Amino acid sequence: MHYDICEIFQSIQGESTFAGLPCVFIRFTGCNLRCRWCDTQYAFEGATRRSLNDIIAAVAEFAPCKLVELTGGEPLLQPHVPSLAGELLALGYTVLVETNGSLDLSTLAKEVRKIIDLKPPSAQPPQNYEEAWKKNLPYMGSSDEIKCVIAHREDFDYCVKKLEAWNLWGKHTILFSAAWGLLREEELVRWILESRLPIRLNLQWHKYIWSPDAKGV
């Protein structure tokens, strides 16, 4: 059982409700989307082939940290990622999987905490993206989080409309982020407050602490 790995490193968790906590990141190579404002294009290629046992050993080097995120790229492109997540859970890790929502979530154990991106118009997702995303609704648990990266008002309105149409308000933590360099956080906060909706502002803390272009942080 082997995986295409871009990098494994420890940092603070920069996003989600786990923000600020030490976390081990396993970044997988490859993605099926090409979002216009993607900040990890370096993960599209340049993989190192590593075995499951090798990855588990690399994560253990950061003990006693027990928070692990599987990210990318798009981790669920690799068929054995659910097995890796299961192994980490069995070893007592809290496992986060950040995914773009277009691939089958049913393969992941219920204990996995999924952070599911909902791509708005500015990301320029493929035509079938919305239908693929909707198919995953039955596999989203109450502990899972939905993240929307907002570049302009059209994105904001789109995400609000879809979350309402799919009856997701109150079922999940909803995270809205400002697309880096495209929208001021102050503007996004104003829209959140005006909406009166339970939206949690999601800042990318790693970009404030280090350079926005830094890798391995």
Image: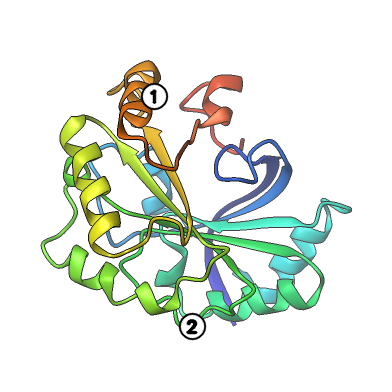
Tell me how far mark 2 sits from mark 1, CA to CA: 35 Å
Lateral position of residue 94 relative to residue 30, left or right:
right
Which residue is painted at 67% across and 75% down in the image?
52
The residue tagged 1 is: 189
Give the residue at the far left of this rendering. Answer: 127
Relative height, residue 146 to residue 107 (above, below): above
Circle 2: element type: loop
Residue type for callout 1: Val
Relative height, residue 151 to residue 172 (above, below): above
Marks 2 & 1, CB-CB < 8 Å contact: no
Q: How far from the left and from the top, in percent, is residue 33?
A: 26, 57
Relative height, residue 209 to residue 62 (above, below): above
Q: Which mark is residue 26?
A: none
Give the residue at the far front of this rendering. Answer: 196
Count of numbered circles in the view = 2
Q: Quadrant of the N terminus?
A: bottom right
Which of the two discs, 2 and 1, labels the residue nearer the N terminus? 2
- Observer-nearest residue: 205 or 9? 205
Q: Which mark is residue 107?
A: 2
Q: How far from the left and from the top, in percent, is residue 56?
A: 74, 68
Q: Mark 2 or mark 1, which is nearer to you?
A: 1
